[in-house]
Amino acid sequence: MPLTGTTIFSHILPVIFGFFGLLLIISGVIDENNPKLGLGLVLFIVACAFPYVVLGALI
């Protein structure tokens, strides 16, 4: 039986983090703003790794 809340960590939060990461990446490239670009890259990588890290710890 899956734990309660695993859908949030595996489907909802990564999509939100990835969406905002892509927005920051695009905005950083267009404005040539390196801190915004770096934050977008970090947020996108966190969105990709988040389900594996959190669900690995929960299950």
Image (cartoon, helix red, strand yellow):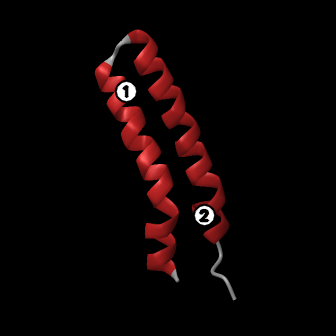
Asked if the residue under mark 2 is in contact with the one under mark 1, i.e. CB atoms within 8 Å, the reply is no
**Residue carrying label 1:** 37
Helix, strand or loop at label 1? It is helix
Give how far across and how far down residue 40 sits, in percent. Answer: 42, 34
Mark 1 surroundings within 10 Å by alpha-carbon count, few (fewer than 14), some (14 through 19), many (20 or more): many
Considering only vertical position in the picture, is 16 above or below 50? Answer: above
Q: What's the mark number on residue 10?
A: 2
Say which amino acid is labelled 2: Ser
Q: Residue at x 43, y 68 (%)?
A: 53
Q: Residue at x 34, y 16 (%)?
A: 33
Instruction: Say which of marks 1 and 2 sits in front.
Output: 1
Q: Residue at x 49, y 51 (%)?
A: 47
Q: Is residue 51 left or right of residue 39?
A: right
Give how far across and how far down residue 4 sits, in percent. Answer: 65, 76
Of pointers 1 and 2, the one earlier in the residue sequence: 2
Considering only vertical position in the picture, is 6 above or below 36? Answer: below
Q: Residue at x 37, y 42 (%)?
A: 42
* Quarter of the image with the N terminus in it: bottom right
Give how far across and how far down residue 57 sits, in percent. Answer: 44, 77
